[in-house]
Amino acid sequence: MADSREFILQYINENGSIEDSKALCDENNFDHEQFINNLKSLYAREMITYKQKSIQVYELTKEAQTYLDAGATPEIQLFNCAPFGETISESDLQEKFNSKKTYKLAFGKCMRNKWFKIDKQTKQITKLVEQANDEAYQALIHSPNFDKNEIKLLKQRKLIKPLKIITIMAGKGGKFALKVPIIVSDLTAEMLNPESDMYWEKIEFNAFNYSESALGNRPLTGRLNSLLRVRQMYREIFFEMGFQEMPTNNFVESSFWNFDSLFQPQQHPAREAHDTFFLESPELCDIDQIPEDYVQRVQSMHENGDNNSIGWRYDWKIEEAQKNILRTHTTAVSSRMLYRLAQEKEFTPKKYFSIDRVFRNETLDSTHLAEFHQVEGLVADYDLNLGNLMGIIAQFFEKLGIKKIKFKPAYNPYTEPSMEIFSWHEGHKKWIEIGNSGMFRPEMLEPMGLPKNVRVIAWGLSLERPAMIKYKIDNIRTLIGSKLDLQQQYSAPISRRED
């Protein structure tokens, strides 16, 4: 029966539902696969409900089928070959059994069941019982309706194997009817005749397919670099956490904003040529663009400190502060933004972030680049502490899907206390540093003019290293530059947060 749809509708109308499509097909000699197709057709028209379920049954192995064909298991066949009340030699019994393949199995079963006894010297076999029960065969003839004990017995002897059968439960749908409506795609002249069975009011028309799949395959297009995808994910996380993005459009910075405003002394090793790229032209910035009173307060803090600090105790030089460099961190931008914030008439708590390129005179290896991206976040508010910093960092990385992090005390000239942030890298099988954090020192904040009890917590990390952890990449140079894996960029999954 190729089209059993009307049978299905009639059956559901009379019985309320179909509980087991497989049993119904077996009962009516229907092809179950075709029957399911007809059920799906009716379900697509909303004429019936449709629920799939799987049933575990057991089917006989080839070995079990041979036992059924023979009418007994090998041990019973061997048992019947031995006479009761007299002995028989093992060779005669084996010849009488006439099956070398199963003799060993059958004889072992007879011995274990204590049906036979053998004299080890004469090799004569005595049949100990007159009748034997063929439990395995009796279980096999109940196929496929085995009880629990039969299943256990037959599984032990590997005479059955489990088989999952998909069956369908069906009931009345929202558009249930006893007749399957005719659905057509094109209008014909016959459909305009009111006396015709194909009159347009008596039939249904296929809905036009306006879905995206009907538009065909999308053409091959470019792909965003993995770093840009991770960058966008970071931005969305910062926005979700209520942060504002800082402008980071100047790669060239003065040493004043990059170092001096952060209370980093001019003799600090990070300001040497082996760590920083200095510009030859223009070598110096126009210091007059920076408010003079702020420059003086920064100079005073470096040289003498204030009531709570002794400063760095050296002669601060304006020439050193004027040197132009390729910025070594985006904290220079943070310093500018905090200074602007301090100039407002009334202080308002702020949360800022930035993601952009920075430059370090680094030795290139699998985890270091001379040009990389720094992610920076900071929060300025009253009476913040180290607990606030650790909590917001943990929340930030959890949203990235990085849950294995730990902190290590560190030293930074412009933050105190300071902490390095480490994350576990599955590829390297070790903890790698992914960021730095701390609370900006009062010596940095007070020259700006921020209120005394305002604290600023901040953290910075590279964009590349967390991307390596997320994509399980063990060489940072394959993310950007000439060693970029174009196929990986094309096929990499879209970055997503792991909630």
Image (cartoon, rainbow, N blue to C red):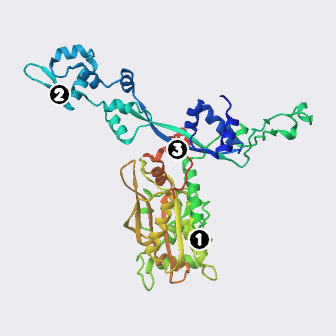
Q: Position of residue 419 (x, y in %)?
A: 40, 67
Numbered disc 2: secondary structure? loop
The residue under the point 40% across, 52% down is 425
What residue is disc 3 on? 481
What residue is disc 1 on? 337
Q: Is residue 78 above or below residue 467?
A: above
Say whether residue 220 is visible: no
83 and 64: which is toward the camera: 83
The residue under the point 42% across, 84% down is 308
Q: Position of residue 422 (x, y in %)?
A: 40, 60
What residue is disc 2 on? 128
Alpha carbons under labels 2 and 1: distance apart? 102 Å
* Type of amino acid at the residue the image marks with label 1: Met
View extreme (bottom): residue: 307
The residue under the point 62% across, 70% down is 289
User: Residue 437's image quarter?
Assistant: bottom left
Say whether residue 43 is visible: yes
The residue under the point 25% across, 16% down is 97
| 75 displayed left or right of 342 | left
Which one is earlier in the sequence, the residue at label 3 or at label 2? 2
User: Residue 93's image quarter?
Assistant: top left
Callout 2 crowding tier (Cα within 10 Å): few <14, some 14–19, many ≥20: some
